[in-house]
């Protein structure tokens, strides 16, 4: 399997291993099925020029089965165990757990599973790898204490690609539906500036048939949310991040938003390695392909392009912007 950045061999401070951690067995714990349909970015209104530089022209799939019954039971058990670490993600989500893959080997093996990666590659139509930043693996959202607020407000993700999976049984959850907007993020930004949220006739709320069902999402390009609950109940979802292995594609990340979300002990090192991997790929291409030329501006621009993500990471780490972007609602 393609690996962007290998999972760290050391564990950061404060991430003790959980005790109820079974051994991940893809044969028993996965039950991968094909999605019925795939929605494209062009269907949302994105232009060919904008789509051309992105990871994939795919926007989202319909829900497909990912976990077996046994896998879904283990996932719920691990999510409940890790819930003690839940904390807010800025003012966007009240209860998230991140970094769980440092605490559960089962969760880590699920999130880095070759079988799931292969499955997603078929859906996305490109080569992908589990996200280079382990904080983006096995992210979990839990129900808020106040049912009048969305579980996760309208937003596009801080990463390029992910799957969003039901952990609790959707049939037992009153509200809390995952929804996405049938439009572009640019259109959404204009609506948000007018104080509007997507009208119901332009949103899709996919039907998840049970726990352990997922949709593949181009998270950076598809505006989505987890709506409010109608009554207080347990509601857990898991989001696992991926990147296109082709570093020539746009980065499609908003890592600066993680400054108010993630443990600084973990974030900056993971972020630096992600940026280094991106630049490493692009510098490799430059080494292989740069031709002789007297055009110093063109060569400087090539170099600048190769290290773009590193320079951005340096600037954003130093700027320490303390907010997480979303569109409200
Ligand atoms: Fe999201």
Image: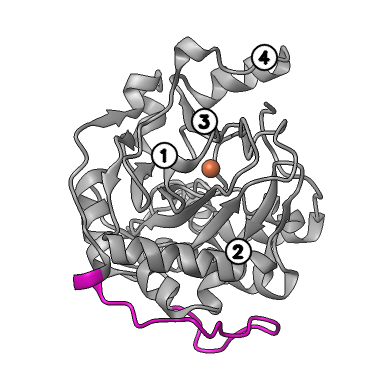
Of 81 and 115, nearer the camera is 81
Residue 98 numbered mark, or none? 2
Query: Where, by quadrant of the figure, is residue 111 drawn?
Result: bottom left
Q: Is mark 3 within 8 Å of ligand 1?
A: no
Please give the residue where the numbered disc 3 appears in the rendered image.
223
Of 15 and 9, nearer the camera is 15
Where are the magenta residues, as a range? 7-28
Number of residues whose C-alpha sits closer than 10 Å to that of mark 1, classed few (under 14), some (14–19) or many (20 or more):
few
> How far across and how far down the image is residue 250, in percent?
45, 46
Q: Secondary structure at mark 3?
A: loop
Does the magenta segment cover residue 226?
no
Please give the residue where the numbered disc 4 appears in the rendered image.
196
Number of residues whose C-alpha sits closer than 10 Å to that of mark 3, classed few (under 14), some (14–19) or many (20 or more):
many
Classify residue 324 as left or right of residue 141.
right
First in sequence: mark 2 vs mark 1: 2
Q: Nearer the viewer, mark 2 or mark 3?
A: 2
Residue sitting at 32 percent across and 77 percent down? 24
Please give the residue where the numbered disc 1 appears in the rendered image.
171
- The answer for how far apart the CA atoms under marks 4 and 2 are is 30 Å
Does the magenta segment cover residue 25?
yes
């Amino acid at each position: 399997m393609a690996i962007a950045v290998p999972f760290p061999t050391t564990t950061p401070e404060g991430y003790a291993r959980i005790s109820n951690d079974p051994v991940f067995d893809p044969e028993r714990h996965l039950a991968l099925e094909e999605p019925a349909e795939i929605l494209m970015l062009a269907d949302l209104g994105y232009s060919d020029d904008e789509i051309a530089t992105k990871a994939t022209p795919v926007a989202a799939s319909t829900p497909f089965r990912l976990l077996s019954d046994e896998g879904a039971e283990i996932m719920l058990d691990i999510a409940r165990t890790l819930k003690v670490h839940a904390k807010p993600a800025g003012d966007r989500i009240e209860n998230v757990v991140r970094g769980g893959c440092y605490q559960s080997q089962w969760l880590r093996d699920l999130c880095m599973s070759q079988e799931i990666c292969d499955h997603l590659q078929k859906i996305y139509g490109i080569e992908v790898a589990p996200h280079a930043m382990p904080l983006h693996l096995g992210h979990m959202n839990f129900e808020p204490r106040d049912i009048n607020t969305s579980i996760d407000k309208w937003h596009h993700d801080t990463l390029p690609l992910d799957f969003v999976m039901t952990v609790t049984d959707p049939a037992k959850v009153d509200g809390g539906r995952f929804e996405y907007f049938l439009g572009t993020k640019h259109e959404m930004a204009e609506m948000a500036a007018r104080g509007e949220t997507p009208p119901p006739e332009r949103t899709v709320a996919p039907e998840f048939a049970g726990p352990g069902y997922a949709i593949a999402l181009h998270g950076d390009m598809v505006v989505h949310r987890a709506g409010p609950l109608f009554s207080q109940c347990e509601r857990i979802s898991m989001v696992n991040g991926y990147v296109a292995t082709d570093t020539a594609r746009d980065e499609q990340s908003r890592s600066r938003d993680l400054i108010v979300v993630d443990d600084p002990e973990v974030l900056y090192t993971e972020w630096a390695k992600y940026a280094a991997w991106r630049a490493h790929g692009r510098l490799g291409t430059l080494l292989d392909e740069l031709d002789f030329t007297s055009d110093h501006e063109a060569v400087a621009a090539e170099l600048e392009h190769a290290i773009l993500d590193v320079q951005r990471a340096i600037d954003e780490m130093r700027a320490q912007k303390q907010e997480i972007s979303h569109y409200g609602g």
